Image (cartoon, rainbow, N blue to C red):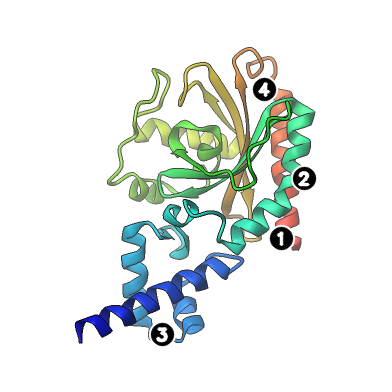
């Protein structure tokens, strides 16, 4: 009896993972239940369990579900990520060669960003299945996405997660982070001034969906010698324009 129950639960969990992974966009719990033909209570219970394990990610600000970081460890299984990387690649490639900086594409998962793609203009390209996680609060790309969260949403994200101090420049106060995010939201781009790694600087901008929600972000990275007060105006404009172009492509897709 127990074995049959566990077998049934595992099957349902796998069906839900497959459903969320095949969706070109994040789903509501009710949509998952409908698409998998499970009752809402069962679907919600399994989703909650999968979220706790990291196989499913729940955006608490929208109550939408997408694949979690554990799935990313097995390779690119998400149609949403495949669509995102496919649509973005030529844009971030052009940005990399126009600016002569390494360019990144990533999505937000709770207090972290998960990198989906990378282009190095020197020719040292990472595999297209490039995956890496970093704290969002100390990266330009992460801050660009976080800047579209409300104060309450940010408090909820960092309720159980501390703002880890990676370098002497890392922002470790939520109030200070919120102030910087407000500036980023108004300017359209975020800055990383050696906040994750010493000497590594960056500029990031968010990719928006048709409802103005930040669903991903792009960034360029370099040193203080290439990303500084003199170069930021020109570089940030190129990053923002690329993010806007990608946003429009996603909306039209």
From mark 1 to mark 4, how far is it between C-alphas? 28 Å
Residue 38's label in the rendered image is 3
Q: Secondary structure at mark 4?
A: helix
Q: Residue at x 51, y 73 (%)?
A: 19
Q: Residue at x 36, y 34 (%)?
A: 175
Q: Residue furthest top?
A: 225
Q: Residue at x 49, y 55 (%)?
A: 74
The earlier-in-sequence mark between 3 and 2 is: 3
Q: Secondary structure at mark 2?
A: helix
Residue placed under numbered mark 2 in the picture: 90
Q: Picture coordinates of residue 99 (x, y %)? A: 75, 27
Q: Picture coordinates of residue 234 (x, y %)? A: 74, 25
From mark 2 to mark 1, how far is it between C-alphas? 17 Å
Residue 131's label in the rendered image is none
Query: Which mark is nearer the camera, 2 or 1?
Result: 2
Q: Is 204 located above or below residue 225 in the figure? A: below
Horizontal side of 186 relative to 110 (left or right) equals: right
């Amino acid at each position: 009896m127990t074995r049959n129950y566990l077998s049934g639960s595992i099957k349902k969990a796998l069906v839900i993972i497959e459903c969320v992974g095949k969706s070109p966009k994040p789903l509501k719990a009710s949509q998952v239940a409908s698409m998998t033909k499970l009752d809402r209570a069962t679907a919600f219970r399994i989703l909650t369990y999968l979220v706790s394990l990291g196989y499913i990610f729940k955006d608490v600000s929208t109550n939408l579900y997408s694949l979690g970081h554990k799935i990313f460890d097995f390779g690119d299984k998400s149609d949403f990520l495949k669509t995102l990387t496919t649509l973005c690649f030529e844009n971030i490639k052009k940005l990399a060669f126009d600016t002569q900086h390494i360019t990144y594409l990533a999505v937000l998962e709770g207090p972290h960003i998960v990198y989906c793609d990378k282009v190095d203009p020197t020719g040292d390209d990472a595999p297209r299945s490039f995956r890496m996680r970093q704290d969002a609060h100390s990266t330009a790309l992460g801050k660009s996405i976080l800047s579209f969260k409300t104060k309450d949403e940010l408090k909820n994200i960092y309720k159980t997660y501390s703002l880890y101090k990676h370098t002497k420049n890392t922002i470790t106060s939520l109030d200070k982070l919120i102030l910087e995010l407000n500036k980023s939201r108004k300017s359209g781009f975020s800055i990383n001034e050696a906040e994750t790694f010493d000497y590594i600087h960056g500029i990031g901008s968010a990719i928006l969906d048709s409802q103005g929600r930040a669903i991903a972000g792009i960034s360029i990275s370099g040193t203080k010698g290439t990303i500084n007060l003199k170069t930021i105006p020109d570089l940030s404009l190129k990053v923002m324009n690329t993010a806007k172009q990608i946003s429009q492509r996603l909306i039209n897709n």
